[in-house]
Amino acid sequence: MRVIFTAHGRKRLKELRQEGIDVNDVVSAAREIPGRVVIATRFRGFLASSGRAFDLVIKDVPAGRLIITIIGK
């Protein structure tokens, strides 16, 4: 499945609260979610390779899985 970042999602990864979360961590977490996500939904409890916990808000669109934002814990 193709994973697409919004500009907001990329910007969030650069913030201090998301420090330690890599693009690869986010992409692999988005691919782990089974099924189809027709409305923007928050998925909780992912772990980055650095050990940092994060949540994702995603939605499936015709082009692929859209990552709307990343929330670091």
Image (cartoon, rainbow, N blue to C red):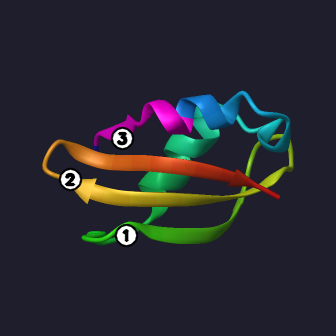
The residue to which callout 2 is attached is: 61
| Residue 56 x, y percent position in the rendering | 57, 58
Residue at point 77%, 33% (across, down): 15
Relative side of 8 to 34, left or right: right
Q: In the figure, 36 relative to 25: above or below? A: below
| Residue 64 x, y percent position in the rendering | 24, 46
Residue 8 among those drawn in magenta? yes
**Amino acid type of disc 2?**
Val
* Residue 47, image quadrant: bottom right
Q: Earlier in the sequence, mark 1 or mark 3?
A: 3
Relative side of 63 to 32, left or right: left
Tell me the quadrant of the picture where the C terminus can be found.
Answer: bottom right
Mark 3 secondary-structure assignment:
strand
Q: In the figure, 35 relative to 61: above or below? A: below
| Disc 3 to disc 2: CB gap under 8 Å | no
**Amino acid type of disc 1?**
Pro
The residue to which callout 3 is attached is: 3
* Residue 6, image quadrant: top left
The residue to which callout 1 is attached is: 34
Which region shows up in magenta? 2-9
Q: In the figure, 11 relative to 30: above or below? A: above
Residue at point 53%, 46% (across, down): 28
